[in-house]
Image: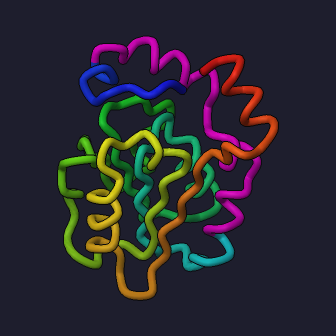
Amino acid sequence: MRYLTSDEIKENRKELFTDMQKMKATPPIRSGISKELVLKYSPKRESKILDCGTATGFFLQELFNSGYRELYAIDIDDYLSIQKSILKDFKFANVSYDPLPFGDKFFNAVTAWEFIEHLENPFFFCREVWRVLEDGGYFYIAMPNSVNLISRIRFLLSG
């Protein structure tokens, strides 16, 4: 996905929605690695988990299917292709600048799968994550590996 400003994201909503529906999820989610990490390090099914940049919600659906019920999502727009009823809450925010709309130490785990590299202000976002994450909680992050040969070829072909 190419870099877009917050305004460009909103202006290109239809195109982005179509692209996300085709892709369903990022590689770490599609491969199952993301779910395996959460199952291993946040095994309590009552864990409160926030998925940032949730896009289609595919990852949260996987967690719901694994027995998690305290699922929260945040994104700049609604691209969900899942039933919102599986979520405790879905919030809209530009997390580059908007505080996360949750209380201090509210979550047991926060996820950001191939999302943080799209932010204009990732430092602000990370400070907010630490604020809403309980002591001893987990912050799961995945970012594309630009050194990987496949990633380089994909970038050369698609930008």
Q: Is residue 33 left or right of residue 24?
A: right
Rendered-image quadrant of the C terminus: top right
Q: Is residue 136 above or below residue 104?
A: below
In the image as oriented, which residue stretches furthest toward the bottom?
A: 136
Residue 108: name its quadrant. bottom left
Q: Is residue 146 above or below residue 152?
A: below
Q: Compare residues 158 and 24 and report the one nearer the observer.
A: 158
Give the residues drawn in magenta, as a range: 11-38
Identify the residue at image location x=63%, y=54%: 65
Instruction: Specify the principal SS of the magenta part.
Output: helix
Image position, residue 11 (x, y; %): 29, 14
Image position, residue 15 (x, y; %): 45, 12
Q: Could you tell me how many numbered marks the image carries?
A: 0
Q: Is residue 83 left or right of residue 131?
A: right
In the image as oriented, which residue stretches furthest toward the right?
A: 149
Judge whether residue 35 is colored magenta. Answer: yes
Image position, residue 31 (x, y; %): 76, 47
Colouring of the image: rainbow
Image position, residue 98 (x, y; %): 18, 49
Q: Is residue 79 left or right of residue 98?
A: right
Identify the residue at image location x=36%, y=17%: 13
Identify the residue at image location x=54%, y=73%: 45
Rendered-image quadrant of the N terminus: top right
Judge whether residue 13 is colored magenta. Answer: yes
Q: Is residue 157 left or right of residue 57?
A: right
Identify the residue at image location x=68%, y=75%: 40
Q: Is residue 133 above or below residue 76?
A: below
Residue 10: name its quadrant. top left
Q: Compare residues 23 and 86 and report the one nearer the observer.
A: 23
